[in-house]
């Protein structure tokens, strides 16, 4: 039995988290849930949207499943996600993106992974007012962090049988910071001669993704570029409501849906739980429960293929509960067939 910290989050978070937990139970995942708080309710209760006890629980149990959380605007609060990534050194954001059945998009055969450096770049939070009306933000790049994230991308490619790693940069305009990152990437790539290494400027990458995203395997880049490209790639296959996400470090890992908390539809049973369900499947892969993870992914794909009981964002007339029940029915049918 694996202990997993559960952060339901805000808005639609509790609804999609309930769905994910039901699906994991139906898949025979061996999970013992440890509930924790983060978001608006936590801010009101504890004076902090990310209470220290929540961080301590993740440190204790090492892995968490997180729903969408809202960082209150004003009050001096920093982003919950940025705090978690920096405090727990979750240096790698991992976003698998692949084409799914019956999702109307202009692309086919998309199957790639975006690997984003999570702790440095402009998101380091180092900015100050130089003089009134002038703000300076510092873009931090260290060789150690650059090599670490590129090596993570190559190891991901190696373990998943991917043929190419594409490093994205803007070294012509940022010769010192991106130049350092590019040199670090080349150094690491030399250790993996059996994986093709490609260098591509970020603007050229955007054009190539629009022309033919199917040619890419693993993309790796710094923080700000990764923030944008990972969402762009999610759009290639139907949006953030379908795509799983993970933030991984050397000791800790948090798996999460990367969409917002959507307070306007909270409590209305309109939320699509697939992104969090697929994130939970990634969590199961991470902790070695691969059989259950594959069952879940297969059941989600089968439900999309049937196009029955889907939520309105997927063009269906179902709701959160009906889609969850449909996924569970697919899981149970497979389990019965394998007995």
Image (cartoon, rainbow, N blue to C red):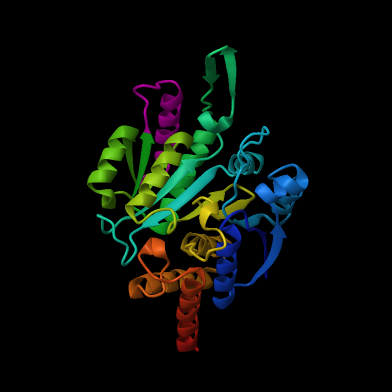
Which residue is painted at 51% across and 50% down in the image?
260
Q: Please tell me which residue is depicted at 44% across the width and 68% down the height of the picture.
A: 297
Q: Quadrant of residue 162?
A: bottom left
Pinpoint residue 163: horizontal percent, then vertical percent.
33, 52
Q: Quadrant of residue 62?
A: bottom right
Which residue occupies the extreme top position in the image? 131
Left or right of 135 on screen, residue 1: right
Location of residue 208 (image quadrant): top left
- Asked if 187 appears above or below 15 in the picture, the reply is above
- Find the magenta span and give its range: 169-194
The residue sitting at 49% across, 62% down in the picture is: 271
The picture places residue 188, in percent across and down from the top left corner, at: 44, 38
- Residue 38 visible, this orientation: no
Could you tell me if residue 134 is visible in this image?
yes
Where, quadrant-wise, is the N terminus in this rendering?
bottom right
In the image, residue 51 above or below residue 146: below
Check if residue 32 falls in the magenta segment: no
Q: Is residue 312 left or right of residue 149?
A: left
Q: How many marks?
A: 0
Residue found at x 56% / y 67%: 20
Residue situated in front as seen by the camera: 146 or 2: 2
Q: Is residue 183 magenta?
A: yes
Tell which of 18 and 338 is nearer to you.
18
Image location (x, y in percent) of residue 330? 45, 79
């Amino acid at each position: 039995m694996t202990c997993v910290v559960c952060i339901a989050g805000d808005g639609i978070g509790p609804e999609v988290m309930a769905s994910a937990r039901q699906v994991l139970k139906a898949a025979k995942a061996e999970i013992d849930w440890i509930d924790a708080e983060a978001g608006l309710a936590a801010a009101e209760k504890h004076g902090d949207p990310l209470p220290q006890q929540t961080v301590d629980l993740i440190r204790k149990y090492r892995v968490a499943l997180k729903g969408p959380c809202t960082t209150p605007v004003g009050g001096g609060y920093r982003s919950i996600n940025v705090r978690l990534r920096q405090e727990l050194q979750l240096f790698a954001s991992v976003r698998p993106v692949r084409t799914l059945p019956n999702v109307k998009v202009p692309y086919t055969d998309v199957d790639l992974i975006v690997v984003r450096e999570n702790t440095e770049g402009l998101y380091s939070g180092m900015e100050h007012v130089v003089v009134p009306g002038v703000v300076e933000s510092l873009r931090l790049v260290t060789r150690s962090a650059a090599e670490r994230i590129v090596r993570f991308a190559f190891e991901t490619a190696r373990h998943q049988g991917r043929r190419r790693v594409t490093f994205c940069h803007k070294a012509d305009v940022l010769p010192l910071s991106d130049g350092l990152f590019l040199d670090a990437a080349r150094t690491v790539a030399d250790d993996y001669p059996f994986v093709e290494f490609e260098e591509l400027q970020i603007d050229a990458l955007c054009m190539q993704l629009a022309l033919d995203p199917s040619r890419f395997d693993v993309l790796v880049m710094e923080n700000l570029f990764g923030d944008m490209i990972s969402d762009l790639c999610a759009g290639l296959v139907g949006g953030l409501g379908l795509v799983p996400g993970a933030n991984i470090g050397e000791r800790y890992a948090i798996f999460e849906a990367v969409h917002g908390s959507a307070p306007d539809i909270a409590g209305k049973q309109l939320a699509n739980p697939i992104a969090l369900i697929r994130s939970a499947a990634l969590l199961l892969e991470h902790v070695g429960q691969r059989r259950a993870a594959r069952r879940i992914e297969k059941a989600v794909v089968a439900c999309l293929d049937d196009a029955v009981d889907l939520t309105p964002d997927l063009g269906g007339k179902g709701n959160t509960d009906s889609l969850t029940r449909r996924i569970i029915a697919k899981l149970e049918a497979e389990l019965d067939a394998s007995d």
